[in-house]
Amino acid sequence: MRNGVNVTALVVFVLFFALVTVMGFLAARWRRTDDALHLDEWGLGGRSFGTWITWFLLGGDLYTAYTFIAVPAAVYGTGAAGFFAVPYTIIAYPLVFLFLPRLWSVARVRGYVTPADFVRGRYGSRALSLAVALTGILATMPYIALQLVGIQAVLDTLGVGGSGNWFMKDLPLFLAFAVLAAYTYSSGLRAPALIAFVKDALVYIVIIVAVIYLPMRLGGYGHIFDTAAAKFSAVSPVTHKPVGSMVTGPDAQWAYATLALGSSLALFMYPHTVTGVLAAKSRNTVRRNMAILPAYSLMLGLLALLGFMAIAAGMGKGVKGYNAQLAVPQLFDSLFPSWFTGVAFAAIGIGALVPAAIMSIAAANLFTRNIYKEFFKPDATPAQETRVAKIASLLVKVGALVFVLGMDKQLAINLQLLGGLWILQTFVSVVSGLFTRWFHRWALLAGWAVGMVYGTWKAYGIPSPATKHFGGSSAAIPGIGEIGYIGLTAFVLNLLVAVVLTLVLRAVKAPEGTDETSRADYSVEVGDKALEDAPVPVAAH
């Protein structure tokens, strides 16, 4: 690892950053419509994105800077367990292929902008809609913060912002935040959609080069795997067990499998992923993307190998309390030529800007539609909704920045893991509603509450070497005794409560609420006559 500022890498990084900044502001003119002050335009890109734009947008949304850093860091720290992200993304796409086209159709017909909009319309429940909206915002905030953590890791490795008072130290991060806030406010979802082309191209180039070039510098894959195996076979003085493994052992298989399954169920419950789906111009666009997005899972598997390479390169060796999140940036800085280090860091940095923009827009959509309009100004005009959403997106990003600067980075990571647990609890309300109206709205709300309380309580009681609470995501499964993902256990409890209480509430004939959707809404495609009566200005899309 180089000492001081890597000037060549920094220049390349800044050039790419300047390029995407210009693209972000120019995006306001891209596919401009006459009615720009409409939440469909600012928050969903006019619901007009085709197959490739949607593919790049969802890829930029799902595979973030934090993914670039955290997945190899998990492999660096624990070995095989870090590969859970690969099977969960493979499992996710066949699952969501079943229900996301239905969500797109009903949202297009009824003018829904958020998943909470759909829940409100399907069950006639303001309380359940509010629960889904608040859960989405709560789960998104630490996710945005971690994108800024990714940028900060790159800046630290580049050697900028590492000295002086607190303001000068974090000035580069402030500047990155200001750029992100400005072009998101100006261009809405079109900005990350346009920038995603650059981001994804850089990511693919960097990973392909890394898995070919770095092993040549490190003595080949045989030496890389041997070095990693030697590290993981060492016994921890704290746990008196090996620090990791190259293959998931029998004791860890339940935790691995349940984490992968739970994460796959949660992936498209996040508001930002739903936003990317609802921005598609047709139902078939959504279906095609669920078929071709697994290409990113191949990239993810190659990306995970960087964790083993960081071990072979000696990243963190002999450093007490080494931050594994720096393993990949330091690996690139040590072994790549300076100019290509700049390209790699630009991929990570831009890989933070795209999802952070989409996440802030999605959170702003939730606040505007399901809190501001629902509870404070039901007669808000589309222009008023858009203005409130723009301000809300700024406040969300400010909150994430304060979180990053004022709190421990490990806490941000732990809360993001907790966010996955929380967002999974909305699955029953959203996905079941796309197929059946059998569940009672009060039962769904009670199930959500049980899942949230149980999952948070169990996670709070898990310590780690770095923190007393929220130190992990796995605990004993009640009734089975195996160690499994807390989020999936909470999800099962959520579902059981919803089923039992629905039977009880139906037996006592409790009021069920009004369903404003119809059966035909869930299979509508662009060009169908049903869209002619849609409550949104379809002609503008």
Image (spheres, rainbow, N blue to C red):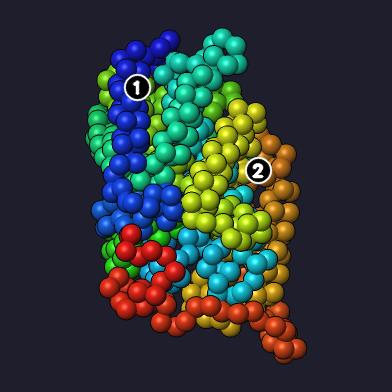
Q: Residue at x 38, y 64 (%)?
A: 537
Q: Residue at x 56, y 44 (%)?
A: 392
Left or right: 26 in relation to 134: left
| Image quadrant occupied by the C terminus | bottom left
**Image location (x, y in percent) of residue 267:** 47, 57
**Image location (x, y in percent) of residue 401:** 57, 32
Mark drawn on residue 14: 1
Circle nearer the viewer, 2 or 1: 1
Three-letter amino acid code at disc 1? Val
Q: Secondary structure at mark 2?
A: loop
Dot 1 alpha-carbon crowd within 10 angstroms: few under 14, some 14 to 19, many 20 or more: some
Residue nearest the viewer, comparing 522 with 212: 522
Residue nearest the viewer, comparing 348 with 402: 402
| Residue 469 in which image quadrant | top right
Three-letter amino acid code at disc 2? Gly
| Image quadrant occupied by the N terminus | top left
Q: Earlier in the sequence, mark 2 or mark 1?
A: 1
Q: Secondary structure at mark 1?
A: helix
Q: Is residue 179 visible?
A: yes
| Residue 99 in which image quadrant | bottom left
Residue nearest the viewer, comparing 60 with 245: 60
Q: What is the distance, in whole Å, between disc 2 and disc 1 at their CAs?
A: 36 Å
Residue nearest the viewer, comparing 380 with 422: 380
Q: Is residue 181 above or below residue 415?
A: above
Location of mark 2 (residue): 471
